[in-house]
């Protein structure tokens, strides 16, 4: 086949893909099918946070220390969980191939972010159940905790997505994710309490991770 004809076939294939592709729930379905196929990975992502939470929850750690450990664990889990797979898929060319179907980038990243957030929340629920069981919070706080964790994981996944867009390798992604997540946690007041009315207090109010930390403290 002549080169000109090959290009015509490629253009025709992409045109048909754009016509048939739905601008929603495409990547959402892909992420859930991948999660279903990787059952061992799902089990590990559920078991490891649980194993890390158990000694803190059952060891009688002070509330401030325990809440900081939980917040760091959950935020790093969401940030790394979004950044590492995204940079890996970009390197493999999978994202580009999906984009060539005509799916708008906002749908590609938005659906992926929401699917990953829901998966992260499901994987962290056993660890969250241990925290709720061993804690002494009131009923309202316990009922609000899963929703607050989900909101924090949306922010962590969004942070991981931005990091993946800036990084150029897995090593850079891991480094940037760790630094960015820890800085965000510091700004959210996880490691220190800012002086009321200061710039630090304003920054703390602006970072979503603050609400997760305060709820875990309760």
Image (cartoon, rainbow, N blue to C red):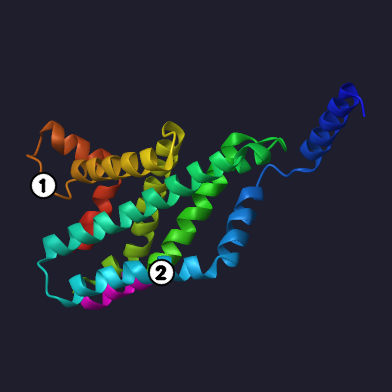
127 within the magenta span: yes
**Magenta part of the chain:** 126-134
**104 vs 47: above or below:** above
Q: Main secondary structure of the magenta part?
A: helix
Q: Quadrant of the N terminus?
A: top right
> In the image, is 100 to the left or to the right of 89?
right
Which residue is rendered at x = 66% and y = 41% of the image? 98
Residue 133 is marked as none
In this view of the protein, which residue sits in the foreground, 73 or 40?
40
* Mark 1 or mark 2: whose residue is earlier in sequence: 2
In this view of the protein, which residue sits in the foreground, 116 or 35?
35
106 within the magenta span: no
Q: Which residue is mark 1?
A: 192
Q: Where does residue 106 sit, x and y in percent of width and height? A: 57, 36
Circle 1 residues within 10 Å: few <14, some 14–19, many ≥20: few
Residue 46 is marked as 2
């Amino acid at each position: 086949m002549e080169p000109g004809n090959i290009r015509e076939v490629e253009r025709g294939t992409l045109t048909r893909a754009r016509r048939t592709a739905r601008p929603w729930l495409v990547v959402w379905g892909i992420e859930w099918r991948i999660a279903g196929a990787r059952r061992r990975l799902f089990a590990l992502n559920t078991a490891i946070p649980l194993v890390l939470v158990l000694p803190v929850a059952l060891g009688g750690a002070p509330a401030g220390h325990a809440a900081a450990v939980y917040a760091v664990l959950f935020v790093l889990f969401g940030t790394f969980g979004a950044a590492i797979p995204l940079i890996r898929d970009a390197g493999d060319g999978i994202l580009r191939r999906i984009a060539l179907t005509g799916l708008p980038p906002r749908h590609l990243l938005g659906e992926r972010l929401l699917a990953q957030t829901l998966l992260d929340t499901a994987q962290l629920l056993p660890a969250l159940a241990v925290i709720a069981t061993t804690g002494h919070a009131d009923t309202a706080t316990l009922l609000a905790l899963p929703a607050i964790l989900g909101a924090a994981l949306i922010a962590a996944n969004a942070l991981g997505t931005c990091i993946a867009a800036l990084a150029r390798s897995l090593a850079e992604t891991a480094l940037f994710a760790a630094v960015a997540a820890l800085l965000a946690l510091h700004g959210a007041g996880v490691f220190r309490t800012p002086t009321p009315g200061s710039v630090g207090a304003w920054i703390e109010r602006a970072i979503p991770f603050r609400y997760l930390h305060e709820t875990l403290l309760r």
